[in-house]
Image (cartoon, grey):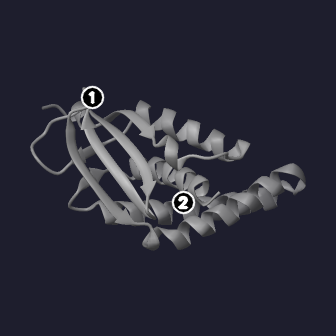
């Protein structure tokens, strides 16, 4: 197995978890998916070599990771409660709203300050996600950041 096989080559967000989203959130989701597919490190625990397909969903207030091989052979599936991520996701939504409002008419210094705070909260969520994945899936920080963005997209839509 080569390191290039430790990656996601397809990602699906569960349609049942999806609802109407706003333009900014949809854009972030599309960018996160494109960036994730362009470069990621993703290795489920176990002996099954990738590359992998990942389906993310929210079911019964739990985050679902359904990991498969590229040919759809099941590899690993697990669920975990959204509770530990909920505060960070809520903070992220609030700061994103402030950011999008500021972009319309605030001075550049204010936009930059809000953007730094937004990235800080995003990093906090990504770090927590990596911690939650320990013993299940090994991901690098950039992959965790992109996955956190997608989890936020699902969470936003599930709450709609």
Name the foreground residue: 12 vs 16. 16
> Does residue 19 appear to the left or right of 97 in the view shown?
left
Residue 128, percent across and down? 41, 66
Quick one: label 1, few (<14), some, or many (20+) residues within 10 Å?
some
Quarter occupied by residue 29? top right
Q: Distance between the residues labelled 2 and 1?
A: 29 Å
Name the foreground residue: 55 vs 134. 55
Quick one: label 2, few (<14), some, or many (20+) residues within 10 Å?
many
Q: Mark 1 points at which residue?
A: 70
Q: State the residue at coordinates (53%, 52%).
A: 154
* Farthest residue, direction left: 47
Q: Is mark 2 on a helix, strand or loop?
A: helix
Residue 7, percent across and down? 29, 36
Q: Mark 2 points at which residue?
A: 122
Quarter of the figure that contains the N terminus: top left
Which one is earlier in the sequence, the residue at label 2 or at label 1?
1
Q: What element carries label 1?
A: loop
Q: State the residue at coordinates (67%, 45%).
A: 20
> Does residue 32 appear to the left or right of 28 in the view shown?
left
Quarter occupied by residue 51? top left
Q: State the residue at coordinates (34%, 64%).
A: 80
> Does residue 147 appear to the left or right of 69 in the view shown?
right
Quarter of the figure that contains the C terminus: bottom right
Residue 159, percent across and down? 60, 60
- Nearest to the eye among marks 2 and 1: give it: 1
> Does residue 21 appear to the left or right of 5 in the view shown?
right
Residue 123, percent across and down? 50, 61
């Amino acid at each position: 197995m080569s390191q290039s096989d430790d990656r996601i080559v397809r990602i699906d967000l569960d349609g049942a978890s999806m609802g109407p989203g706003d333009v900014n959130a949809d854009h972030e989701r599309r960018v996160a998916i494109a960036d994730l597919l362009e470069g990621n490190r993703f290795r489920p625990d176990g002996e099954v070599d990738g590359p992998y397909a990942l389906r993310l969903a929210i079911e019964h207030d739990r985050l679902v990771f359904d990991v498969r091989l590229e040919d759809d052979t099941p590899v690993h599936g697990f669920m975990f409660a959204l509770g530990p991520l909920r505060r960070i996701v809520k903070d992220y939504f609030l700061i994103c709203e402030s950011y999008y409002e500021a972009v319309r008419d605030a001075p550049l210094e204010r936009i930059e300050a809000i953007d730094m705070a937004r990235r800080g909260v995003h990093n906090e969520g990504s770090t927590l996600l990596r911690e939650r994945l320990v013993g299940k899936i090994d991901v690098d920080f950039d992959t965790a950041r992109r996955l956190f963005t997608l989890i936020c997209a699902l969470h936003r839509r599930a709450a709609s």
